[in-house]
Structures are given as structure tokens and as C-alpha cells.
Image: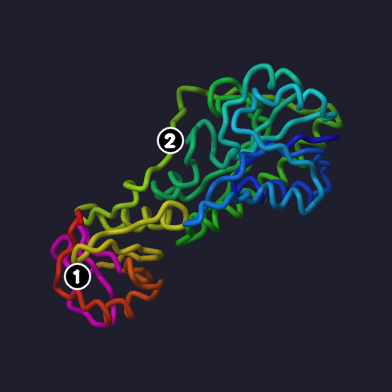
């Protein structure tokens, strides 16, 4: 069965890689155009394009899929697979062949742009990977397969994304086998249980210490790997890479007078910063940061 793959992110690349490892035939990849990156504004290809070219798979870059419909109609394929593509697919494309999507949530929960982040942000203990038929409404198509996935203790975004993407590629292989045997079934989603999640902005990474420590911990787990999580101290933006909640009681936003542990008071308990980075420094442990920055007893300030 010949497959047309559409994806543009790291999640997409892992799905594609797993599909190839499962022996599936991907005849072409559609992905986003190269983007200007860094201070030199040099054009850089995304991970999906780089990987596909390494595997000698034809790559088509486009910002709007409707602009390449004629080209896609000339490709011989039996099924299209979408994984974190980032574009709305027009009906004219969906009518060409069966189009299925890999979605990293227990649909209809967390439809939209940020299912993995919201899973961690809300402290969920379990999520799922769903294979569904693509429909006009975002993530509302009929479900083909859905596999529950336990979230590991203290798991961060990058780890969970990697695991879910790999499972997604494996479920695509299962779906192809069902198609070959003409045993595929479609189950409608119950829209009354649907929740929608937005794309996060940089401002969503700001830690508000008037929140409870477990909520801040989940915020770090959900957003530090992809968006960036930070607070402001001595009018400097301090980026946080990892943290854990602790039960030491401090005034909200105050840094503990402890030379070994970087602890900040919250509305409930406190948060220990395990690794962080100042604007002019490098990534370091919370202890090393304390020794250099010496912020003991100071209060974080939310605005620089």
C-alpha cells in the first residue's frame, strides 16, 4: 500500500521513522517550506524534510496544500497519513483517497494544537494515541484505533512526545493491515465530551508563584522542553529547565535562605529549581546558580 505522508514537526518525523521501520511504503512526503533561522536568517529545512531526503523519499514543500493539488493528483498513492502537519486540508484533497491522522490524545479530549502540553499541564495520569479519519472540523473525525498510554512519573514533554509518536507510527501499521484485510471500522466521536486546546504563546511560560507548587511543576514538565518556562529575579529573566515541588513553607515568591537548594515559595508549598539559566549564562544546576547569583531571601518579580 503506497502512502502519502504529511507532517512538519519532530513528532511527525518520529511517526514517519516508525512507519518505515514497520515496513510501510511511503512514496512522498509533504511538509512546510524551509524557514529562516538564527542571526544569519539562513534557510533551514525541518526534521521531516531532512529525514525523508536521507531515506530517498520525494519531498514536496508547501505553505498551502491547495497550491499543490494538481501535483498531488499525479502521485500514485492509496492512503494519506497526517501527523502534526499544521494546515487545514481542503475537501478536494480529502476526497482523493482515505486520509487518516495521528493524534496524541484520548479524543475527543484535547482536540487542537497542544494535546501533549495540556495532558502534562493538567497532571493527567494517562493519555492515548488516536488514529482517526480526517474530517473538516479539527480532530473531529471518526476513530479507527485508540491506544491508552500511561504517563511516567515525573515525565516531561520531550519524553512523552517521543513515546506517543512511536506508538502512532505502530498504530498506522495496524491500520494499514486492517485496510488490506478490509476489516477497518469507524467509530464516531461523542462531541459532548470534546475539549479544545490552543497553541501556547511565549507568555504562557511565565511562572506565577501565587499558584500551587504542583501546578507550577506541571507547567515546567509541559512547557520547558518546547516553549520555554521562566520567572524574573533581580530584573533578569531566569529560564527553568527542570524543577520539583517541595513542602517547605515560604512567603509567595521568596527565595529560601539555603545555599544548597534553589527553593522559591508558592501559594502552596514551594518549588525547587533543579536546573536553570540566566540571560548571560549557561545552563546550570540550581545549586550552582545560587552560588553565583546569590539571590537568597529576595523575591521574584513577575515583570522585568
**Numbered label attached to residue 70:** none
Q: Quarter of the image holding residue 12?
A: top right
Residue drawn at point x = 61 percent, y = 39 percent = 32
Q: If you read the primary sequence from the N terminus, does the residue marked by circle 1 or circle 2 appear first?
A: 2
User: Which residue range is magenta in the image?
Assistant: 248-272
- Residue 131 lies, in percent from the top left, at 65, 35
Residue drawn at point x = 69 percent, y = 52 percent = 50
- Residue 56 lies, in percent from the top left, at 82, 49
| SS type, badge 2 | strand
Along the line of sight, the residue nearer the viewer: 100 or 62: 62
- Residue 27 lies, in percent from the top left, at 82, 38
Dot 2 surroundings within 10 Å: few (below 14), some, or many (20 or more)?
A: some
Along the line of sight, the residue nearer the viewer: 62 or 201: 62
Residue 62 appears left or right of 52 = left
1 and 2 marks in contact (CB < 8 Å): no
Identify residue for label 1: 255
Identify residue for label 2: 197
Residue 117 is inside the magenta segment: no
Amino acid at each position: 500500500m503506497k502512502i502519502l505522508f504529511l507532517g512538519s514537526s519532530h513528532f511527525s518525523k518520529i511517526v514517519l521513522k516508525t512507519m518505515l521501520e514497520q515496513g510501510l511504503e511511503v512514496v512522498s512526503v509533504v511538509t512546510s517550506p524551509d524557514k529562516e533561522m538564527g542571526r544569519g536568517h539562513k534557510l533551514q529545512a525541518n526534521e521531516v524534510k531532512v529525514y525523508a531526503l536521507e531515506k530517498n523519499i520525494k519531498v514536496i514543500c508547501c505553505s498551502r496544500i491547495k497550491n499543490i493539488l494538481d501535483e498531488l493528483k499525479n502521485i500514485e498513492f492509496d492512503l494519506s497519513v497526517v501527523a502534526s502537519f499544521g494546515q487545514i486540508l481542503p475537501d478536494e484533497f480529502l476526497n482523493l483517497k482515505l486520509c487518516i491522522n495521528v493524534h496524541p490524545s484520548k479524543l475527543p479530549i484535547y482536540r487542537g494544537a497542544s494535546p501533549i502540553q495540556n495532558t502534562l499541564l493538567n497532571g493527567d495520569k494517562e493519555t492515548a494515541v488516536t488514529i482517526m479519519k480526517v474530517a473538516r472540523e479539527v480532530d473531529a473525525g471518526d476513530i479507527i484505533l485508540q491506544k491508552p498510554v500511561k504517563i511516567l512519573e515525573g515525565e516531561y514533554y520531550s519524553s512523552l512526545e517521543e513515546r506517543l509518536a512511536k506508538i502512532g507510527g505502530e498504530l498506522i501499521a495496524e491500520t494499514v493491515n486492517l485496510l488490506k484485510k478490509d476489516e477497518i471500522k469507524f467509530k464516531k466521536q461523542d462531541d459532548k465530551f470534546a475539549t479544545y486546546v490552543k497553541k501556547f504563546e511565549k507568555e504562557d511560560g511565565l511562572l506565577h508563584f501565587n499558584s500551587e507548587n504542583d501546578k507550577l511543576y506541571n507547567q515546567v514538565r509541559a512547557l520547558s522542553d518546547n516553549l520555554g518556562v521562566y520567572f524574573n529575579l533581580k530584573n533578569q529573566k531566569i529560564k527553568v529547565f527542570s524543577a520539583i515541588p517541595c513542602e517547605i513553607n515560604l512567603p509567595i515568591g521568596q527565595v529560601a535562605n539555603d545555599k544548597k537548594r534553589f527553593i522559591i515559595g508558592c501559594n502552596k508549598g514551594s518549588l525547587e529549581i533543579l536546573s536553570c539559566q540566566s540571560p548571560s549564562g549557561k545552563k546550570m544546576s540550581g545549586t550552582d546558580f545560587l552560588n553565583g547569583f546569590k539571590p537568597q531571601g529576595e523575591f521574584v518579580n513577575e515583570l522585568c
